[in-house]
Amino acid sequence: MQNATDVIKADLEYICENLKEEFQKMQGKNILITGGAGFLGYYLVQSILHQNRQLSDSDKIKLTIYENFSRGVPDWLTALEDDSSMEIQKHDMRFPLPDDIKDFQFIIHAATIASPLFYRLHPLETMDANINGLRNLLDYCLVQKEKSSPVEGFLFYSTSEIYGDPTPENIP
């Protein structure tokens, strides 16, 4: 019988096996994940760190997480704080990016609350993190291009709630 740890390990192996090409492009580079403590963030962070365990130090993906921790700091993320290939920064994507932001080659913007329990309590914050965060990151990409240090890949996650009030059959 499998337990949750076995299922997660199998998931991570499956993800890493099927993203070999993508992970190879990221080796030795800096990646930013916004909203890294969320549901999607969990698997994104875990997958990168799982991949890193198979790489030499120079090839490891250098992961930075921006998170506002509005729902608290999850235990799984606290348990990873000592990983030298990962940096966690408290940052709310509703606001401008930090002045000391690094050069990132890859960005995953997943800083938006997808839980009906939370986005109903914080609808404007949800929209602002999604929209203002995206705008700030796209502006960052333009600056990076002008500096001849372009962002090579950008992935944007969104929540349907920013597009309006979903009909009851579309609410989980």
Image: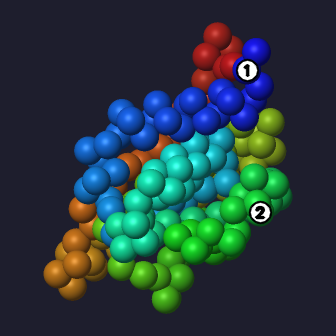
Residue type at numbered disc 1: Gln
| Snapshot colouring | rainbow
Of residues 134 and 13, the one nearer the viewer is: 13
Task: Give the number of callouts.
Answer: 2
Q: Of helix, strand and loop, which one carries label 2?
A: helix
Q: Of helix, strand and loop, which one carries label 1?
A: loop
Of residues 133 and 144, the one nearer the viewer is: 144
In the displayed structure, 164 sits above or below 58; it is above
Q: Position of residue 134 (x, y in %)?
A: 44, 59
Q: Which residue is drawn at 45% across and 54% down?
A: 54
Residue 48 visible in the displayed image: no
Quadrant location of the C terminus in the rendered image = top right
Query: Which residue is under mark 1?
Result: 2
Query: Which residue is under mark 2?
Result: 78
Quarter of the image where one finds residue 148: bottom left
First in sequence, mark 1 or 2: give its number.
1
Quadrant location of the N terminus in the rendered image = top right
In the displayed structure, 105 sits above or below 110; it is below
Residue type at numbered disc 2: Thr
> Disc 1 versus disc 2: distance between alpha carbons?
25 Å
Of residues 26 and 111, the one nearer the viewer is: 26
Q: Which residue is drawn at 47% across and 58% down?
A: 52
In the displayed structure, 84 sits above or below 157; it is below
Q: Position of residue 143 (x, y in %)?
A: 28, 79
Q: Position of residue 131 (x, y in %)?
A: 49, 55
Q: Which residue is drawn at 26% across and 44% down?
A: 21
Q: How crowded is mark 2: few (under 14 residues within 10 Å), some or many (20 or more)?
A: few
Q: Are marks 1 and 2 in contact (CB under 8 Å)?
A: no
Q: Residue at x 41, y 60 (%)?
A: 55
Quarter of the image where one finds residue 25: bottom left
Q: Residues within 10 Å of mark 1 (few under 14, many from 20)?
A: few
